[in-house]
Each structure stands twice: as C-alpha cells, then as structure tokens.
Image: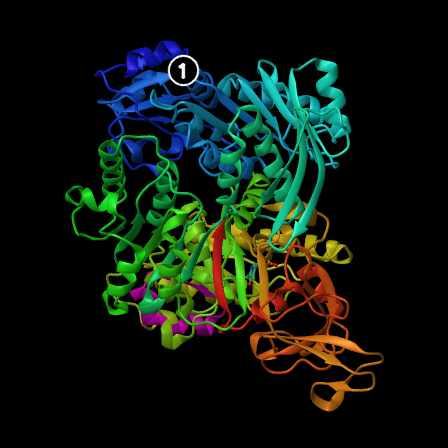
Amino acid sequence: MLDFQQLQNIINGKALQVVQPLPVVHLLTDSRKLSQPAGSVFFAINGKYNDGHKYLPQLYAQGVRQFAVEQGEAATLAQQFPEANILQVPDSLEALQQLAAWHRAQFQVPVIGITGSNGKTIVKEWLSQLLSPDELVVKSPRSYNSQLGVPLSVWQLQPNHTLGIFEAGISQPGEMENLQRIIQPTIGIFTTIGSAHDEGFVSTKQKVDEKLKLFTAVELLFYCADYELLHAAVQAQGIKSFTWSHNRKEADLYINATNVAGHKTIVVYTYQGQKQRLAIPFTDEASIENALHCLAVLLYRRVPLSEIQGRLDRLHPVAMRLEMKEAINGCYLIDDTYNNDLAGLSIALDLQASQPQRGQHTLILSDVLESGLPEAELYLKVAELVQAHKVQRVVGIGSTISKYSHLFSKAEFYTSTADFLQAFDPADFRNEVILVKGARVFEFEKIVQAFQQKVHGTVLEVNLDALVHNLNYYRSKLKPGTKLMVMVKAFAYGSGSSEIANLLQFHRVDYLAVAYVDEGVALRENGITLPIMVMNPSPDSFVKLRQYNLEPEIYSLEQLQAFVSVLEPEARYKIHLKLDTGMHRLGFEKENFEALFELLAQHPQVQVVSAFSHLAGADEVVHNDFSQQQIASFTSMATALEERLKYKIIKHILNSAGIVRFPAHQLDMVRLGIGLYGVEATGAEQEALRPVSTLKTTVSQVKSIKQGETVGYSRRGIASTDRTTATIAIGYADGYDRRFSNGVGHVLLHGQRCPLIGNVCMDMCMVDVTGLNVKAGDTAIVFGPQLTLVELAKSIGTIPYELLTNVSMRVKRVFYAE
Ligand SMILES: *Cc1c(COP(=O)(O)O)cnc(C)c1O
C-alpha cells in the first residue's frame, strides 16, 4: 500500500512536516465528504468558488492527518497541525491528477476511455453491464468525468479488476491532455458530436480535435462514421478505428436498417460479410445509438451472437437521477436506483448524511452486485461505509447480504423484496431519512411505492444540480470577501424551503432570509443552523425569534420600541435595519435617525448586524439612474449609521438583478433571490442560468369533440372543427393561472405545444391534442426548460416570481440530483 513518503515523490511535493508513516487510501477534496479520516489525504484545492485551505482546521479536528496544501507557512502549519503530515505542492488539483496517473500506470489491464457530447454515462453503464459476465469492471461513479472527477474515478482501480471504463468530459481547450494522462485508455469510444460548439470552443472542428486527444495512444477507437467531421479528423490523424455506420457500407459494422416494433427496435446489420438481426429493448434514437456503440464493442470482442441478444435484453434505462421526496409518517425518502456498486453507495450515503436531522438515518440496501470484490471483503467495506456515515438502521434485502448480518448493528434482514413487503408495517418507520438503494433485479421501486404518500398526479420537480449551478454563477461574480445572503422566503420561491436551505447550508452561503417568523422556525426545526434574517416579524412573535435564534429586520421606530420592550436583561440581540431609499415600502428615513440612535444607545445589548435597502427597479435599464441614486443615498445613510454606532455593520443593497447590473456596488453582502431559481431578472444573462423547476401533471382522459361542440365551463372552448382534447390534472387551485384559459396558455405533451381549450377549472383543464397520439396517463409539462417561466409570465402579463410562488402546497415537490 502506498504511504505518505512515497506520495511525496509521486506528486512532486515538498514535505513541510512528516510526523508518522501513514497509508494513503482515500483521496479527499471536499471537506464535507469526509467519512473515514484514517487513511484519508486531503487535497486543499483553491477553486473558483471556494478554497479548500479554509477547512484544514476542521478536518484536523475530525482526525485527518495528511494534507497536500498550496499555501501556508511551514512553521505556522506545524504549530496548527502538530500531528499531521503536510506536503506543499504548487497546485493541489495537479498533484491529485499526478497521483491518479501514477496509480493508473501500476496496472496493465485494458481501459476503455469514453468521450463525446452525449451518451457518455449511458454507454459506460451499459458496457459495464454487458461485459460484466466476462470481466470485473471498474468504472466512473455516476458522471465523474471532470478534471476532478476523473482522478477520483481512476483511483478506484484495484488489482482484481480486469477492465476499466472511464468517461472524460471537457469544457475548454487544453483539458483533454490531462485526462488522457490519467485514464491512459487502451480502447476508445467517441459517442456523439453535437453540431453546436460548446461555449469554450471556437468551432466544432476545434472541439472534435480536442476531444480526440483522449485517444492519442489507443489501440482502437470505436465511433460512428456518420459524423462527417469526426470521421475526417480520425482519418486525418490515422487513429486505428472500428467504425459503424448507417450510410457507409465499407464501415466495419454496417447498419442495414433499424425498425421500431412495439417496445423494441429490430436492428439488421452486416458484420464480417454476415447479415444478422438483433432486437434492442429501446425505441428512441439516442438509446439506439448508444446501444449500437455497445454492439460494436461486443462484436469486436467476439462475444458469441447467441449471448449478445440475451445480454441486450437485460439492458435497462439508466436512471440518471437520484430523487428525494416526502414519504409516510414524516419520513423522507432518497430513491437511488442509479446503480448498485460501492462507489454509488458511497455517493448516495454522502447525500443522506447531508440531510437535516430529521430523526434517524436508515438504509435499505439489496445485495451489492457488480463490485468485483470477494463477498466477505465487499460486505466488510459496506459495513465500514455504513458506520462511517452514521447510519443508525440497516434493512438488508437479499440472500448474500443476509449472510453478513453479523457485520451490522441494529439491522434486520430479508431474503427478498417480497419478504420485506410482506413484513412491512408503515408504523415501523417514523421521522427517518431513508435511503433506498437496490440492484435492478430487486425491484426496489415496489418498496419506494410502499413508502410514498398518496399524491395526485401533479408534481413540481426541482433540479438541485441546476440550483447549485446558478448559485455558483452568482458567486463567481462576487469579489472575494463579499458575503452572500440567499432569500428563501415564500417556501423558497415555491421550490421547498428546508430542502433548498439545506443545500445552501451545505454550500456554505453566509445568510438566509425569510419573510415571517414561522418560516424561520420551520428551517430551524429542519436542522438549519445558518444565521437567518426575518424580514417581517410581528411583535407577537418576538419571543419565538429569540427562542429560535432568528434575527429580525427592524424597519420603524414603533417596531424597535416594541422589540426593546421584551428584551431580557442579560441576553444579546442581533438586528438588521432596513433603510428606505426610494422603494417606499418599509424602512427608516433620514428624519428618523436621531430617535433611532437614542433608542439604540439606551439598549446596548441590541447589536445592529447589518443595514440594508432594496432597489425598486434594478431589473429595468430605464431605472438605472434611479437605482444609482438609491445606492448613493443608501451608502451615505449607512455610513452615517456606522459612525454613530462606532462599530462595523454589514451593508447590502443588491438583489439578483442588482448583482448583474451594478457589480461595483456589492458592498459587504448581496441578496440573491430569483436568480437562484433560474430566472435572470434583467434578461441579459438568462443563458448563463439553468432552469430549476419543472411543473408536471398527467392526462386523466382523452376525448373526441365534434365540430361545434364546446369544452368546459361557460362553454367557452368551441371546437371549430373536429378536435381531440386531453383533460389534465391541474387547475387554478394548484396555482395554474386562470388567465391561461382559451388558447392563451400551452402545455407540452410528447414535446409538442398543445393550447388550452376552454376555461381553466379548479382542479383540471383541457388542452387540444388533435393529431397527437396522446393517452390517459401521459405526462404533460406545464413549465420547465422547454416552456419557460419567462415566456409564460409574459403571455399573461405577470412576472415569473408570481408563477413560481403560486404553485400550491398540495402539489408535491420532488428534488433530484443528476
Ligand atoms: C425578495 C427580496 C430580495 C431578492 O429579490 P430578487 O429580485 O428575487 O433577487 C432581496 N431583498 C429583499 C429585501 C427582498 O425582499
């Protein structure tokens, strides 16, 4: 096993302090993911949004004793971390990559490297499934394909593995050479090449050339020769290849035809002069293409034809996401059917560990398949992971995991999913965060169903990855040291307050803000410990404020008087002063200042943490002068305040639009709202954000309407010709605005826009689906990435804020990560 002394040579580091010989087992780059301090080396990476060096003391306190750092004085570090081994490196990410490249070079096994614009993860998952009868496969967990993800993936390679499959993704020139050095693929697969070039590239040609750098040393590259640009580039570079094609008969694998038949696609192909046919259990184009890449590899590897069909039959869609949702008895369910290997288990356990303290953490786990480890070793590792993540209760399902029951404390075991369901009593599960993770064959979706609350067909899906993307986008605009307050008022703009707040806490924002005390209390009860400002606390809630450590916004003398009248003698209180600079909603004006100071002077136990104001027109250019004026008067008022108080206060005025439009006036803090949820209020940088929420519902019934008949209340929907309508399960009681009635609004069904016909009812509405093959049970998208809030809001003369916050509480929220 590698130890710290060797590490020093491999990554070209300078030893600042070596205290003890320690094994290098786990590579840690995210302090929040620490689970096994012994054997972990923390690489302090100075990233775009955060600096790993900040977390050294915390990790040291948690028992980590090996660090690779870029910064810091040897003497200071030694004093701070007397028992730690410390290496200094010029660049921690590079050091991590060097280590992974060294690790890879220790193994002679074949390694498949996959890149391309789409399909990387699916081809990787499928290939590993298709080849696992013959090989012990190690693969990238999820879509770990970045400069950071690739080294962590390759680090998993162990002597017992016989094949590695790793994916590589890049966003700008220069990155692929790094990934090539780490993966050192012997076989390549280039999945697809999108026609548009990504942001970081000047042309598609440049992008292709860059991606091909993964394959400079492969023995063979698999690709589809129908991508002309790719084909030309591979030929020009003389890379030895295995091609497949729908058009070129000279390709190694020629696809004569693909015909959809029911739920399958029949593929007729010619390989080595032989015409054959096979069925693929998918019908969409992307899946067919991904399956054909896999077929090419199977044929090349001489997997017998009789075998190939059987293996293809067992392919299943790769669940690309992990969902979190409310379940029975106050439980919270994390549903991860993505895959069932050790790395996937570890990632899912990390996510569970980051959930707020809603009672105990429970894991329902099937036999772990495709691990490549001997059973005894495997379940020892599983038990270690479970313990490291502080899972209190384990339900093991399957005959193998049951054999190792002695490794788990507080655990129960069942030999099959059916056995578990037979014994299942909902009352046994209360206020728990339950991670459900099972191999496909165990059909854990049945367990998920048993735990789910009954819901009607409408859900608001919240994409947590998109939310983090947006958070980081705004963060990247902040000067170092500028604090970030995130507005989670109104149930986090309709998206779900505790889940979002929890994610924000995980990503270390500085402050949260809510409108009312009850909202703050709910956050505290869900384990949120960040400072929380309450913008509109009523006097009767002042006691609760203190009880839950919430900080009030104070906007008037009357309110301050009421507040100081309930102070307890020994306690200290934090408040935020709102100044009115032109919004004329809430806030102190200059004239109130003398009285304000007097009152504050009489109550020194009250500390003014911050002073702020709100821009009335930051989203519109026409109000730029007015906004500037507001900023100027705020700065002068807040400075006067600070001088009189004789201590520093946090000054802040910018909302989401302000952050984009007035970057010079971030002051000490900014307040991010709608931007986090994917709407760029000025419109100028909308492209940089990712849409966060999708509102979905289902079709209840499909009807044929004869010419002249009418649809819905007041007979407002008149069929001008024979029509087909679909009744969908959303109405104004769900927050679907009645102004969308009669053709103003659309929903997406099968990707097509279908206009509303007739008036929106309380719980339903009808849409025109003439010419589409719509059936009861189909999913309709009310808003989402393809039908944007901005567009919909405009069509009924309102703003995206209103549409988002109108989604009623009876609509279930489902959170997912990709
Ligand atoms: C809601 C709110 C914000 C955030 O506004 P966005 O336009 O959503 O960015 C900022 N400050 C105050 C005082 C608010 O009430």
Q: Can the viewer see residue 49?
A: no
**Image quarter of residue 567:** bottom left
The residue nearer to you, when weighing 79 against 565, is 79
**Image quarter of residue 733:** bottom right
The residue nearer to you, when weighing 158 against 477, is 158
Span colored in magenta: 542-562
> From the viewer's perspective, is 586 left or right of 3?
right
> From the viewer's perspective, is 268 left or right of 356?
right
Looking at the rendered structure, the kind of residue marked 1 is Phe
Residue at the image position 53 percent from the left and 59 percent from the top: 461
Residue at the image position 29 percent from the left and 62 percent from the top: 421
Horizontal and vertical percent position of residue 76 = 31, 21
Horizontal and vertical percent position of residue 22 = 24, 19
The residue identified by callout 1 is 107
Q: Can the viewer see residue 269?
A: yes
Disc 1: residue Cβ within 8 A of ligand 1's nearest atom: no
The residue nearer to you, when weighing 297 against 434, is 297
> From the viewer's perspective, is 50 left or right of 28?
right
Mark 1 crowdedness (10 Å alpha carbons): few <14, some 14-19, many ≥20 = some
Q: Is residue 679 above or below residue 184?
A: below
Q: Is residue 722 above or below residue 148?
A: below
Residue at the image position 44 percent from the left and 36 percent from the top: 141
